[in-house]
Amino acid sequence: MSKKSDNVDTVNYKEAVTLALHDALDADPTVFLLGEDIADQEGGGVWKVTPGLSTKFGLERVRSTPIAEEGFIGAAIGAAQAGMRPVAELMIMSFLGCAVDVIHNVAAKWRYMTAGQASVPITITTFVPTGIGMAAQHSDSLEIWLASSPGVKVVQPSGPLEAYELLTASIFDDDPVVYVVPTNLMYRPTRVPKPQPGTRVDIGKAHVTRVGSDVSVIGYGTPIADALAVADRLAEDGIDAEIVDLRTIAPFDSDAIMRSVSKTKRAVVVHEARTNFGPSAEIAARIYEELFGELEAPIQRVGAPFTSVPSSPVLEAEFIPGSSDVEAAIRKAIDA
Amino acid sequence: MIDRPVLHRLYEISTLGKQFDDKVEEVVRSGAARTNWFSWRGSELLGAVCGLSLGPDDYLVVYYRETVAQIAKGSSPKELFAEALGKTGGLHKGKSGFLHMADLDAGVVMNSGIIAEQLPVAAGWALSSTLRGDDKVTLCTFGDGGANEGAFHEALTLASLWKLPVVYVCHNNLYAEHTAFAKMSPVAHVADRAGAYNIPGVLVDSADVVATWNAVTTAIDRARNGDGPTLIEALTSRLRGHTRADAMEYAPEGEVAANWEADPVVRFRAWLISEGHASEDELADLDKKAHEDVEEAWHFANESPYPSTDELYADVFAQVGGVR
């Protein structure tokens, strides 16, 4: 049991996100936040990731917006073109359709259309709430919509330390970055020491969380966070799994993937997003292109089924890919 | 009243815009080059007013038909034409093409080929001025069709709520793509919508250059003084269609011919002389200079090479992998 004093010098995932926003606001006057309900008067954000920030940094730099995603994300894009570093919160990823035009047709393309003369250093934080019955129009994982748009980066941290480091990296990256948070992970109790202000990890670089020799488990988000426990169980059966946490979905770390799979010869690709047309389809296709002759098993993919997200808890539990799905896929790859 | 030098500058830009559009039309019809660069004939006066009324540090946000305002703000006809033809001498090495040309050196900061998407982005440019505490103004133009897009609604909502230093100027040439404005607008005038956002709405006829100049400069001053946004609707006319391939068969018989008969640049020219603001010689000199600039732009664009195919792969990201 952790004492209250332990919490002062440590952060969980949610607090890491707040801390990264705080430290960025503190370090750079061009950083500002916008989003629905994010100021303290409105509760510091529905996900409680911005408490205290408007009080400390003022309502100009931490501003609650009307419910007008195309408007305020479009404005954030304009401010980014003008040299600011805005962080816009898209409250729920399923609302991406409200703003996808200005993200895809302006933010993603502006650098290319101007032949490199201009940048759009915007960060969009967005949240995927699952497991609480909010269902079809609130619980989508839509990384692929953005990953398939050249010029946008998409990241998803799986734990508190990289939550801080990736968000810091996203804010100070000169490209548009969409930072996707699974809310379940955000509220987990795991704590790490508070990172030094400004620490960051490279976007586009995967992290090997477990070195192994029998199978590569490649993915991001909740299933990858839970893969360590799965690997420990499998180790008892003599299966030595390597876990590659992509952290960045677009552009993903192809070198790290190929390094791992050329060693293990077997791959399992996991994410919470739907399998069909999901990021795992692209990753698997690339692995087949580069390592086909070396593979000892077909690539296994774990993700959500090709349906809308249902509300009833029994159905939603069936929808969300879990550790048993990952374990089954690993065993299938090993037994092939 | 407007100073004589300003009136001359307005005419200088207007005659250049008129001749430039006619040249593009000639080039396209003759097959000398391939482009679908959308015509701006009939909106030259408004473009000249919008571009010239801004200071060098102010921000101009435009859309795909707003070539004249770009030129007035400082873009080079040579670089515009080369970009429209996809040549390496163009503003963006031919990678943008004619639908979304910007010119950061001239303060033409944003352009949009997606109707109305530039309005919220322009609010963002104005927001950057508020946050920085500088006194720059953003002027954003759009067509009458854009007033129906959700982006218009959201942008004006934000601009009003945050009292942003932005001026929104609508070109109403009475057609949106191939459909008459009157058929698609629930209100008689775009400017009528301003009340919904609690901002001033101003209606002018761009053929009345003095009234248009006064409306735009008043709105710019208002924004610069921290009093917030204005919505200006300026009536223009269509002499050519939505695209260069559009013969405007949907317009009532005789309407397009009447628009040509009432060519606003020609009437402005006559007005300058009749009111004693310019002599025939002075204007003939400006016409001749414009002709030379247009010919020079065409030769530059025509002779500019195409970019190498390596260019296809460049500029997707500013940074790949690491961060600075």
Image (cartoon, helix red, strand yellow):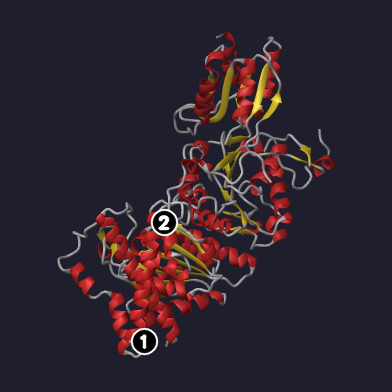
The amino acid type, in three-letter code, at marker 2 is Ala
- Work out whether residue B35 or residue B221 is closer to the camera in this orientation and state it: B35
Position of A276 with respect to A223 (left or right) is left
Q: Which mark is residue B82?
A: 2
The disc numbered 1 marks a residue on which chain? B
Left or right: B76 with respect to B137? left
**Position above or below: A289 against B86:** above
Q: Which mark is residue A200?
A: none
Describe the element under mark 2 as helix, strand or loop. Answer: helix
Q: Is residue A54 left or right of residue B54?
A: right
Say whether marks 1 and 2 touch (CB < 8 Å).
no
- Looking at marks 1 and 2 on the same chain, the residue that comes earlier in the sequence is marked by 2
The residue at the point 24 percent across, 75 percent down is B262
Pick the quarter of the image with the N terminus of chain A.
Answer: top right
Residue nearer the viewer, B111 or A59:
B111
Query: How far from the left and from the top, in percent, is residue A248?
Result: 61, 36
Graded by Cα atoms within 10 Å as few (under 14), some (14 to 19) or many (20 or more), the crowding at tag 2 reads: many
Q: Chain of mark 2?
A: B
Amino acid carrying label 1: it is: Ala
x and y percent of residue B242 in the render? Answer: 29, 59
Q: Position of residue A242 (x, y in %)?
A: 67, 20
Residue closer to the observer: B209 or A36: B209
- The part of the image, by quadrant, that contains residue B281 is bottom left
Image x and y of residue A162, in percent: 70, 37
Quadrant where the C terminus of chain A is found in the figure: top right
